[in-house]
Amino acid sequence: ITDDELARLEAMAREQDIPLIVDGAYGTPFPSLLFVDAKPTWNDQIILCLSLSKLGLPAARTGIVIASAPVIKALSGINAIMNLATGSFGAMLAEPLVKSGEILSLSREVICPFYKAKMERAVEAFRVAMGEDSCRWYIHKPEGAMFLWLWFPDLPVSSLELYQRLKERGVLVVSGHYFFPGLPDDDWKHRHECLRVTYSQDDEQVASGMRIIADEVKAVWAEHGVAGQS
């Protein structure tokens, strides 16, 4: 989401006097796992949710909420009832990094470049696997996080069926149709033509998975009597 889009959403929320909840698990100010520029934003209309898991501490299960005082008070009460006493391990590890500001340099100079390089290797692995004269495919512009969105226009099977075929071969992806809730027109083909693929694991595992995805997509076209859609 762009800075301008976020500003428009915030204005709409303010006009209706409702909070705007922002899931910033990959965003600014940390872990800043973004390959595009973005400005850290918060005001009393926004409930900003951050996480330490993308900083390499997934098992610490530490979430951070930045909001107005009444919201924080309510969340603290809910948290006390639901969890009684939450773990402080993650907070203790992160506190000196936050106080010193190192959490920002760590995000910008270590975490983001690390995952950007992994993204580029994953994109190249898939490009090579699909080949130059294969079926039509696209990768939605990677702008951050740990995922690629693969798009196969006019694929003869749904993304859910492709997911099931890939699962049988040991490759786990997420069917794109789950990410379009609330659309009035369920027949929009695009929502059934995309896969979400993570590149966060070992590079060779990712490359192997990309080769299997490419193989299955080509097999689908072959089974439907089409060698390729150039």
Image (cartoon, rainbow, N blue to C red):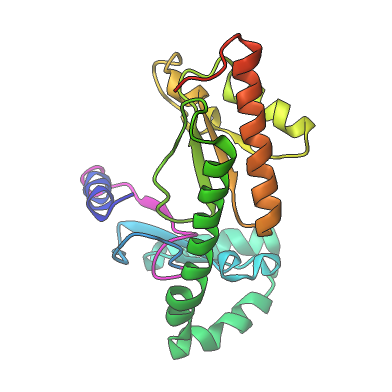
Residue 134, percent across and down? 52, 28
Residue 42, percent across and down? 31, 64
In the image, the segment drawn in magenta is 14-31
Q: Is residue 121 magenta?
A: no
Residue 162, percent across and down? 64, 25
What's the residue at 56%, 51% (across, down)?
122
Q: Quadrant of residue 30?
A: bottom left
**Height in image: 209 above or below 120?**
above
What's the residue at 66%, 22% (across, down)?
219
Is residue 220 found left or right of 26 in the rendered image?
A: right
Instruction: Report the quarter where the C terminus lies.
Output: top left
Q: Is residue 19 magenta?
A: yes
Residue 51, percent across and down? 54, 65
What's the residue at 69%, 72% (across, down)?
87
As drawn, which residue projects farthest toward the top? 225
Is residue 83 found left or right of 227 in the rendered image?
A: right
How many numbered circles are shown?
Answer: 0
Residues 144 and 116: in front is 116
Which secondary structure type mostly characterizes the magenta part of the structure?
A: loop
As drawn, which residue projects farthest toward the front? 133
Q: Quadrant of residue 95?
A: bottom right
**Height in image: 66 above or below 7?**
below
**Height in image: 114 above or below 224?**
below
What's the residue at 49%, 79% (across, down)?
106
Residues 67 and 108: in front is 108
**Height in image: 161 above or below 199?**
above
